[in-house]
Image (tube, grey):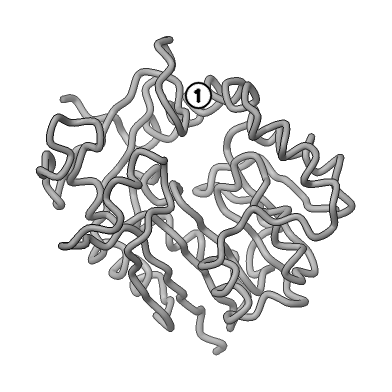
Amino acid sequence: MELPTKEQAIASNREAWNDSARHHKDSSEWQALLKGVEHADFSCLDDTLTALLIQTGIDGKDVVQLGCNNGRESLSLFALGARSVVGVDQSEAFLGQARELASRSPHAPQFIEADIHQLPAGLLERFDLALITIGVLNWMPDIGEFFRHVAHTLKPGGALVVYETHPFLEMFDPEAADPFRPTSSYFRSEPFVQHEPIVYEGRIEQPAAPSYWFVHTLGDLFSAAIAAGLQIHHFREYPHSNREELYDRYQQQAAQLPLCFTWVVVKPAT
């Protein structure tokens, strides 16, 4: 397979997400979100992430979510006491959804369209807390460069909170005849490529711009964060899945894989 350049992958992923956005509104979940965000205490965050954000200290803090998608998680941060929230995403179409949700909310987040590799100067060293959730890291072709840019958004002493799918899961295909047989290397160097719209459940048989999903080992992630000057303060793996429903089949096994993880890294105060 001929690999795209970093710039080509980023641009194609942006186009793929914009192509896919309309499909995410054709659901009962979207209608529920429109009603849910009207309440000041709205939150779509699960217990794992909620507890970690409280433990890390979100109350009264300025927070940025990198890869905010339709903004539902960004809006949820106000219920935990965030003073201000900025959501950043490169998909114009999904940010349109985020602003639609925000217009129904009593809170006032800011949503900014930007490639994480070309952040506006106004976001640099501005935040006490940065948040990355499921499905952000694997869209990044250069994980080292990504973490350098993330670190730049944090004030000295600021923390990055990550709640992501475990890279072990990239070895398995939940739709295979034997979903428990590894089908891909943990150390895979080529991205997975999809030519259909990106949806969380099922499949839509329509053409879309190619999307590139990159595999990063835990070692890749840790090394990238450390090279960016961040210090590891917390890391924990879990037996539950936080990604698409198809992956729930890997839960509650006698020989249990780690399915997701939480991670906190901190920018030194001096």
- Residue 48 in the image: x percent, y percent? 51, 67
Of helix, strand and loop, which one carries label 1? helix
Name the residue: 40% across, 21% down: 203
Q: Residue lying farthest bottom? A: 270
- Residue 112 in the image: x percent, y percent? 70, 44
Q: In this view, does 161 lie to the left or right of 109?
A: left
Name the residue: 25% across, 37% down: 174
Q: Is residue 19 left or right of residue 34?
A: left
Question: Taking 36 as reference, is 23 above or below it?
Answer: above
Name the residue: 35% across, 67% down: 238
What count of labels does the image hold? 1
**Residue 96 showing in the rendered view:** no
Badge 1 crowding class, 10 Å Cα cut-off, few under 14, some 14 to 19, many 20 or more, is: some
Name the residue: 37% across, 32% down: 9
- Looking at the image, which is closer to me, 105 or 266? 105
Type of residue at label 1?
Answer: Glu
Q: Quadrant of the N terminus?
A: top left
Give residue 167's quadrant in the image: bottom left
**Residue 97 showing in the rendered view:** yes
Q: Residue lying farthest top? A: 206
- Residue 101 in the image: x percent, y percent? 77, 39
Which residue carries the number 1 mark? 15
Q: In this view, does 154 lie to the left or right of 8?
A: right
Question: Taking 257 as reference, is 31 above or below it?
Answer: above
